Image: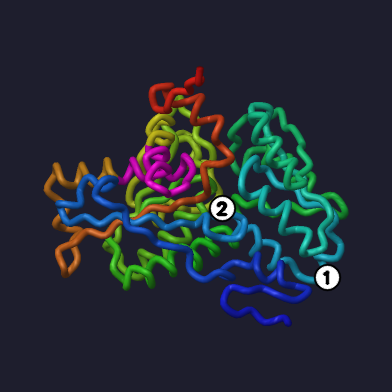
Amino acid sequence: MKEKTGNVFSGEHALFSYLAPGSLGPTPLVELPEALNLYAKDKVRIFVKLMQFVPLSNIKSLPAYLMLWKIPAKKLTKIKNLVEYSSGNTVLSLSILSKYFGIENMHAIITPDVPEHKKRLLRLVGANLLISHGPPSPGVFDSVGGIADAKKLGKKVGWHNFNQYINPANPGAAKDFVGKELWQQLARDLSIFVASIGTGGTILGAGSYLKSKNKKVKIIGTAIKEGSSIPGPRGEGMIDKLGFPWRKAVDEVIAMDEKSAYGGSLELIRAGLFVGPSTGMQYRALLSKIKEYKRKKTLKNLRNKRGEVLATFVACDTMFPYIDDYFAILPESYFPKIKHLK
């Protein structure tokens, strides 16, 4: 058997088919209840797009697959080593997916400040770690740092560097599997879209598509407030050093601190949405923006024909890779106490 029916994947190439983008159908879009939506009584409806409901549990697995898929067959046979500047979901996904394209080794260039639990996760999935001692958050076109190191290694015989920061498969995946799906799931009716800015691919791909369908849709990006650390997004001082022209799709950028990101994520987790800190960052940013619209009495400009405001944000992954960070960043009072039985 080789066919797929009812989410059953069988045959010799079943795993390859299962791992392909879209193999499980559209990812879920879930509306938040009043307990999580402070503006429900203002006829604001908030949805979260659960992109972790793909086989590798993270949004970056989609461009990772497409980048591999787009390598010409003749070139693919010559590649034995992939190298990418990433300590997160991109290289995690490439480590798994590259083997299905005949590539033996995945090398992740990371910086010395990457915590041990993230290193262990990358090694768990088979990534080889290369430590770059350049700047911790290099510009895409800088001549030094991890991105430049990856480019240099990628030019060696038998090596290849995708450079996710400028690779068109990055926004392309977001257009197809975030933007298009959202537009269909919400019956072509959306007021606000929020996404964090890491490479800029998600917000450019999904945001541009949504703007092309309705120029009135507000596209809001989130960046890390100076002095904070949140895995995935870029700091507010670095977002204009990215390779994609993401600003053409974005109306506004909101900078968020780490406590808000992890605290927002914790709220969603305890409601049954297993999402990471960058999702909490978007959630809190969206609430703050709706609060501003309400204060300025501009919510009316975003209402649909039914008088509703429909807003959505993106869940990029789960909280599991970051559990240690929640306890390091949030006060102990956020967590139940441990008691010993007598």
The quadrant in which residue 323 appears is top right
Can you give x and y, in whole percent of width and height, for residue 149 in the image? 74, 40
Which quarter of the rendering shows the N terminus?
Answer: bottom right
Residue 81 position in % (x across, y down): 82, 52
In the rendered structure, does residue 339 fall within the stretch colored magenta?
no
Q: Which mark is residue 74?
A: 1
Query: Which numbered marker is on residue 58?
Result: 2
Q: Residue furthest top?
A: 342
Give percent across and percent down for residue 85: 68, 43
Eye-nearest disc, 1 or 2:
2
Please tell me whether residue 296 is drawn above or below residue 138 in the rendered image: below
Q: Amino acid at mark 2?
A: Asn
Q: Is residue 196 left or right of residue 23?
A: left
Which residues lie in the magenta part? 264-286
Query: Is residue 274 found left or right of 303 in the rendered image?
Result: right
Reply above or below: 128 against 184.
above
Coloration mode: rainbow
The residue positioned 37% from the left and 40% from the top of the image is 267
Of labels 1 and 2, earlier in sequence is: 2
Q: Position of residue 337 (x, y in %)?
A: 44, 23
- Between 337 and 50, the residue placed more toward the observer is 337
Crowd rating for badge 2 (residues with CA inside 10 Å; few <14, some 14–19, many 20+):
many
| x 50%, y 35%: residue | 230
Which quadrant holds residue 270?
top left
The type of residue carrying mark 1 is Lys
In which image quadrant can residue 186 be found?
Answer: bottom left
Looking at the image, is 128 positioned above or below residue 174?
above
Q: Secondary structure at mark 2?
A: loop
Q: Is residue 287 visible?
A: yes
Q: Is residue 161 left or right of residue 38?
A: right
